[in-house]
Image (cartoon, rainbow, N blue to C red):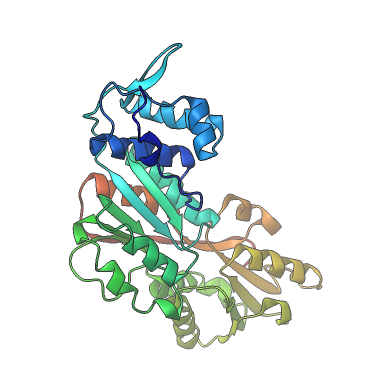
Amino acid sequence: MIPKNFFKYIDINYYSSTPKYLQLANAIVKAIKEGKLNEGDTMPSINELSFEFEISRDTAEKGYRHLKKIGALGSVPGKGYFIKDAEIDNPLKILMLFNKLSPHKKIIYDTFVANIGETAAIDFFVYNNDFTFFKKLLSSRIDQYTHYVMMPHFGEAGENVHEIINTVPKNKLVVIDKLVPGITGRFAAIYQNFEKDIYHALEQALEQLGRYHTLKIVSPEYANFPKEQIVGFLNFCHQYAFNYVVVNHLHDEPINAGEVFITLMENDLVELIEKILTTPLQVGKDVGVISYNESAVKKVILNGITTISTDFYLMGKRAAEMILEKTIEHEEMPFYLRLRSSL
């Protein structure tokens, strides 16, 4: 018999980035651990789950398959699913908070998931650089997880973000991509050094940059990029006597011979290339192009776009390893310059 209050134990958040099948599986595991579901209890059918929670049959079936894989459920042909083991060992329950889900942030997420193990329960949310939403997500879920993995990128509104992050037990905290001043105690962190990284990457390209007189970094006003990137860029330009411009509106920015453009966003790179192609200027000879964040397609665009980038695969892998190995340390990610014909 299906437990009387079964459907009250399941909470599907339709705004969460966590796949619905995992939300279903995680909720059932939680109910088992809390003693609300017991060994031998009959589970609703795939059709009942699909109808009750307005999810597809494939989603419901995938959730049950996951539970069978970790040993929580059993099934009998013609009779359905039941709780097989109420002593299931599924110790890792992780809350992941990302500021956005760009192609490179997705690499971090996918690599983390691939390395953390199939039995880990992950609730994943994207807070869109909104400090108020981030605070609400975290405050309402304190003490519900074994680990909190967060990527803290905000505008000026997030200047006190360390105060809310400090409410997380430090042995459960993993900060990725960016360190936030004011977080106290010993906690795990895998991060970029934005100011140092761009400075040293440009320094490695000094020979090629020497053929140009002006460096322009494209940093749209609406985007919440780390201020340290601009600081590192300006420090380099001052140190090596380059003219420089911080471009907030690429659409209105002229393109002249002797200039190098550094783009931080993929859509700005596309717009920049489109603008250059309307001029007689030749990329890599008259005007230079450097793009943040390596990707396969940049190896072939215009015979190769020069990139500066951290290792996003390693970042996701190390975050998972720190949790599994119970490591509490700060690890700065390597940063690479890949010279190609665009410079």
Q: In this orientation, which residue lies closer to the viewer: 59 or 184?
A: 59
Residue 157 against residue 302 in the figure, above or below: below
Q: How many discs appear?
A: 0
Examine the image and state in which quarter residue 182 appears.
bottom left
Q: Is residue 34 above or below residue 247?
A: above
Return the x and y of residue 281 as percentages of the image width and height: 77, 73
Residue 59 in view:
no
Which residue corresponds to the image point at 71% horizontal and 74% vertical from the top-left?
A: 286
Quarter holding the N terminus is top left
* Horizontal relation, residue 298 to residue 26: left or right: right
Classify residue 264 by image quadrant: bottom right
Residue at x-position 33% and y-position 56%? 149
Q: Which residue lies at the image location 62% right of the left edge and 76% below the top edge?
A: 260
Foreground pick, 234 / 144: 144
Q: Is residue 252 above or below residue 225?
A: below
Residue 158 point in image, percent of width and height: 40, 76
The reply, left or right, for residue 169 in relation to residue 278 is left
Q: Residue furthest front?
A: 4
Across and down, in percent, residue 34 comes to 23, 39
Q: Is residue 194 visible?
A: yes
- Residue 240, image x, y percentages: 48, 84
Between 278 and 157, the one nearer to me in the picture: 157
Quarter occupied by the C terminus: bottom right
